[in-house]
Image (cartoon, rainbow, N blue to C red):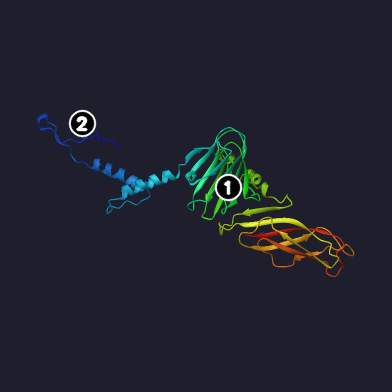
């Protein structure tokens, strides 16, 4: 928008600006014409509409509200940049809403600690803007917990993410847990779409059952504060010289709320005729562990130890 320089000669003489006129110079006063007022009102309406409001002739505060909404929207799309060179760093509320940028070019691993968020929705993102790769270790301060979406947490609540150049790890606080997820820079390249599952597959490779003992936490989309937890391991039923043999096991991690079920499966034989024992729970499992019982069901007695695997589900 600009002054209406296309209007009458009187306006053009003053660069399009309005004038009260000058009788001595023969310059008449400016006239109020339709295009001038329509332009002013259209400009205001455009701002009100852009702010997500419906123009209403009975309201006189819409322009202020629309400007505030536009500023808030822009602020939400912008992050502060906080360069970090330390190998060990504790994230504080001052970092929420920012990119913690790792751009030193060093290949040294980093370990960052998250304290509880202040409000649900608090978020901090770690971005590697260098061309050097390193391992980023994320841990949370007790009593907080974390849901790791792209890497299995260790026993101490630590997840390690391989940070290539351009990779990000985003942490979001929901009031009880930190939701921690990894985004490969490969997703940002042109033409990338969700039908290309190459990176998804590689990210989930750490969640396979290749280890003898392990824990997986997966998001429960019906209750994000309560993840679904899978645990597995192994044990050995002792040589009891009886028809039954029992062993108590402790889960790799205590289930925060409850264990839904535990299963066992024998990997060996014992007793007369080398029978495979039937594995069952001798008692109801607790959040911390369970007791397994092997039974030969009258086929003989245990005359050797028997290895078995177990699998538990809970939350």
The vertical placement of 3 against 144, above or below, is above
In the picture as drawn, the residue positioned furthest to the bottom comes out as 298
Q: What secondary structure is found at the residue carrying circle 2?
A: loop
Horizontally, residue 8 falls left or right of residue 276, namely left
Q: Name the residue under label 1.
A: 181
Q: Earlier in the sequence, mark 1 or mark 2?
A: 2
Q: Nearer the viewer, residue 120 or 29?
A: 120
CA gap between label 1 and label 2 equals 61 Å
Compare residues 76 and 41 and report the one nearer the observer: 76
Label pair 1/2, CB-CB below 8 angstroms: no
Dot 1: within a 10 Å radius of its alpha carbon, few (fewer than 14), some, or many (20 or more) residues?
some
| Residue drawn at x 67%, y 53% as measured from the top left | 215
On screen, 222 above or below 10?
A: below
- Tag nearer the camera, 1 or 2: 1
On the image, the x and y values in percent for residue 168 come to: 56, 42
Residue 285, x across and y down, in percent: 69, 65
Measured along the vertical axis of the image, is residue 258 above or below residue 103? below
> Which quarter of the image is occupied by the C terminus?
bottom right
> What is the number of the mark on residue 14?
2
Residue 1: quarter of image: top left
Crowd tier of the residue under label 2, counting other residues whose Cα lies within 10 Å: few below 14, some 14–19, many 20 or above? few
Give the x, y percent position of residue 157.
62, 50
């Amino acid at each position: 928008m600009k002054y209406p320089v296309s209007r009458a000669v009187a306006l053009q003489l003053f660069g399009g600006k309005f004038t009260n006129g000058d009788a001595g110079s023969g310059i008449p006063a400016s006239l109020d014409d339709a295009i001038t007022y329509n332009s002013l009102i259209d400009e205001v309406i455009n701002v009100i509409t852009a702010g997500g409001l419906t123009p209403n002739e009975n309201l006189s505060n819409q322009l202020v509200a629309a400007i505030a909404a536009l500023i808030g929207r822009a602020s939400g799309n912008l992050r502060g940049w906080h360069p970090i060179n330390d190998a060990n760093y504790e994230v504080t509320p001052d970092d929420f809403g920012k990119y913690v940028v790792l751009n030193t070019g060093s290949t040294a691993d980093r370990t960052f600690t998250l304290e509880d968020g202040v409000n649900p929705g608090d978020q901090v993102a770690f971005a590697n803007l260098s061309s050097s790769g390193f391992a980023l270790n994320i841990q949370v301060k007790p009593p907080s917990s974390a849901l790791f979406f792209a890497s299995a947490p260790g026993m101490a609540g630590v997840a390690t993410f391989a940070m290539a150049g351009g990779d990000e790890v985003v942490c979001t606080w929901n009031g009880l847990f930190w939701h921690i997820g990894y985004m490969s820079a490969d997703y940002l390249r042109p033409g990338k779409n969700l039908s290309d599952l190459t990176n998804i597959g590689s990210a989930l490779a750490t969640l396979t059952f290749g280890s003898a003992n392990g824990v997986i936490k997966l998001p429960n989309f019906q209750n994000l504060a309560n993840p679904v937890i899978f645990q597995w391991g192994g044990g050995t039923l002792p040589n009891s010289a009886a028809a039954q043999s029992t062993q108590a096991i402790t889960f790799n991690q205590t289930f925060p709320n409850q264990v839904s079920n535990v299963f066992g499966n024998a990997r060996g034989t014992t007793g007369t005729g080398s029978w495979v024992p039937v594995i069952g729970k001798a008692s109801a499992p607790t959040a911390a562990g369970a007791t397994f019982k092997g039974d030969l069901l009258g086929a003989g007695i245990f005359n050797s130890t028997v290895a078995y695997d177990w699998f538990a589900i809970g939350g």
